[in-house]
Each structure stands twice: as C-alpha cells, then as structure tokens.
Amino acid sequence: MSIALMTEVWRLALPSVDKLVMLALADWANDDGKCWPSIARIAAKSGCSERTVQRALREAEKNGHLTRDDKPGKGCLYTLHPRHCVTPDTVSPVTKATKTPDTVSPNTSVNTKPKNTKRALPVDWKPEPFGADSQCKAIVDSWSPKELATQIEHFSAHHRGKGNRFLDWQDGWKTWVLNSRRFAKPESRRPANDGPGSFLASLGSGP
C-alpha cells in the first residue's frame, strides 16, 4: 500500500466510483505506483461491477492518472501517477490548501482505510494454511477433509448470507476456527484418520 499515492488520489476531482477504483489500486500499489490486480479483484475491493471498473480504468488512463501494460497470459501491470487535471485559475487554491498540511495526510488515509478496504467474501476465496505454531493449525489438523470442507462451506454461506464485509477474510476464518472448539459437539473433535491438514495444504496452492 502506498500512503503517498492514496493521498494524491484523494485530491483528484473524480466521480465517486472512479475515485474508488483508483483508491483500490493505490491500496495495492508499491512506492513506485505499480500493482497488478485482476479486474475481478478490483471490482470486489471497490464494490463496483467489472464493467464499471473497466470504464473507470479507461477514463483514468485517458486522463493520465495511470498507465496500463498488458502482459498476455499474466494479466495487466498498472502504474499509477495521479495528476491534477484542472484549469489554471483553480490550481492555486488547491495547491495552497493541500501542501501545508502534508504531514496530516497519512492520518487521514489511515482513518478512512477501514471504510474503503472492507470487502465482501470473494467468490473464489480459499483459506490459507496456518503456521506451524498456530493453535488454529492444531484444530484444523484434527478435522477430516470432509469436516474441513463443511466448515469452509458453512463459513462462506454464513458471511455471504449476512452480507458481512471484512478487512481480512483470513483473520475472519481464524476466528471461526478458534470458535469451533467452543461450539463443536464432542464427537466432532476426534482426530481424522486420513492425515492432518492434507486438505488445507492443497488449498494453499490456489490463487
């Protein structure tokens, strides 16, 4: 995430949807302004449709806010370089008003980040394997592949049904696994016969 780029995007005079798309890219970008998310991921992060995201990207490229480098088979590399496209008589007030409180900008971005980065559970979401020292790993290893698949399906259906939005869905899954011990029936805690963690390990190879 580039705080400097997000600060610049906030200053742009853009329609709200276009600004959301630019903010999503800035949240992924490194300090050089480069990122490579898919259209589907940008849509999920910004809460817009894929068609809307594609239109916003075309407008941003046309107005000089970003450059796209399509790499066949690998996706698209975006380079962000937000520029203030305004007439000369409106440039001065904006420059004077924003240059002085530059040191306050990171706080503004941090305060608004949770609102802009919470997202619904992606359609292709899969949990990542837990670390070797994690209590969650011990719990998951005690499940059979069938029970693990059931837990993931229950987790996904529960949060999609409620329309929940999280900053980090892996953290949400971690909480779900930890709570499973408290709500599980005694017989569901027995170790599986077909090898601990084999199903979750296979999920780690996904996108």
Image (cartoon, rainbow, N blue to C red):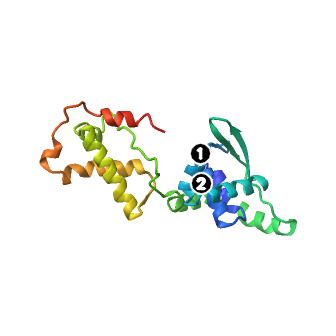
Residue 166 to residue 124: above or below: below
Task: Identify the mark at residue 146; answer none if there is no mark.
Answer: none
Dot 2: element = helix
- Residue shown at the point (51%, 62%) measured from the top left: 115
Q: Are marks 1 and 2 in contact (CB under 8 Å)?
A: yes
* x then y, percent, for residue 32: 68, 42
Mark 1, residue position: 37
- Residue shown at the point (15%, 40%) measured from the top left: 190
* Kind of residue indicated by mark 2: Ala
* x then y, percent, for residue 66: 73, 49
Residue 131 to residue 171: above or below: above
Residue 103 visible in the displayed image: no
Mark 2, residue position: 24
Q: Nearer the viewer, residue 200 or 86?
A: 200
* x then y, percent, for residue 176: 30, 51
* Kind of residue indicated by mark 1: Pro
Q: Quadrant of residue 10?
A: bottom right
Q: Nearer the viewer, residue 80 or 205?
A: 205
- Residue shown at the point (57%, 55%) measured from the top left: 43
